[in-house]
Each structure stands twice: as C-alpha cells, then as structure tokens.
Image (tube, helix red, strand yellow):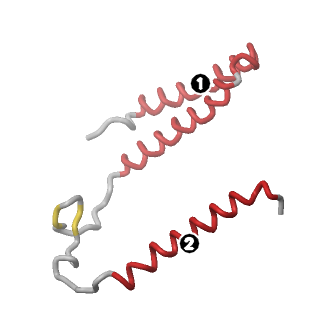
C-alpha cells in the first residue's frame, strides 16, 4: 500500500472507532428508566392524535417528481457552464435544444393542470 493513502486509512480507523464508541458507550453509562412520557408518540413537538396512516394526495408525488426532473436539469447544465468557452456554438446549440425540451415539458405539465391544487 502506498504511503500516500496512509492518512486516509488513519482517518477511516479514527472515524470507525469514534462511531463505535458513540454507539456502545451510552448502553453502559445511560440510565434505563422506563417512563410513560417517553413512550408517547410525538409529531413535530405535539402529541399525535388520530390515525397516522393517512392517504397522501397523488399531487404531492407528481410535484416531487417534477422537482426532481428540473433539479436534474440543473445537474446537466452545470458541466456546460463550466466548459462554456470551450464548447463554442456546438455546446450552445445542444444546451438550447435541451432547455427548449424542458420548457416544452413544463408548458405541457402546466397546460394539463398538474400544478393546479383543489
């Protein structure tokens, strides 16, 4: 093993030891006193009421998928922005087509009423 990787190995060993100690030590040092207040289910600082298994409207998932799609768009545009001066017109045309396709998909989603909440 080259000596260049030795600091990484030391860091890995120290991180493993610290993680193991922080997981094992509370079992030996911490008190185990059951308490009814500790058994309460708390959501966002409030006591839970009703059934926790509610149906989530499908629009949440659709908006989440749209967010992921447009977030990935930014991920694809980042390398283009880094290589902007090297790609010249060819890169500009490629990114223009890519952006137009994404704008077209956004307009389609908008016209379909996916972003409308009832």
Nearer to us in this view, 53 or 42: 42
Which numbered marker is on residue 99?
A: 1
User: Image point 37% across, 46% down: which residue?
Assistant: 59
Q: In the image, residue 71 lies at what x, y percent? A: 52, 37
Mark 1 burial class by Cα count in 10 Å: few <14, some 14-19, many 20+: some
User: Image point 53% across, 39% down: which residue?
Assistant: 69
Q: From the image, tell me which residue sits under label 2.
A: 17
Q: In the image, residue 19 lies at what x, y percent? A: 51, 70
Q: In the image, residue 61 lies at what x, y percent? A: 41, 49
Image-quadrant location for residue 96: top right
Position of the N terminus, as image quadrant, is bottom right
Nearer to us in this view, 2 or 55: 2
User: Image point 28% across, 86% down: which residue?
Assistant: 32
Q: Is residue 83 left or right of residue 46?
A: right
Image-quadrant location for residue 74: top right
Q: In the image, residue 23 lies at what x, y percent? A: 45, 75
Q: Is residue 4 left or right of residue 114?
A: right
């Amino acid at each position: 093993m080259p000596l260049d990787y030795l600091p990484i190995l030391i860091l890995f060993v120290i991180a493993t030891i610290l993680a193991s100690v922080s997981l094992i030590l509370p079992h030996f040092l911490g008190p185990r006193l059951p308490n009814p207040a500790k058994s309460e289910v708390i959501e966002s600082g409030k006591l839970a009421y009703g059934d926790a298994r509610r149906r989530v409207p499908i629009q949440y998932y659709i908006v989440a998928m749209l967010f992921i799609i447009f977030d990935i768009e930014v991920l694809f545009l980042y390398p283009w922005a880094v290589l902007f001066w090297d790609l010249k017109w060819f890169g500009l045309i490629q990114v223009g087509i890519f952006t137009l396709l994404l704008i077209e998909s956004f307009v389609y989603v908008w016209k379909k009423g996916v972003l409308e909440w009832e």
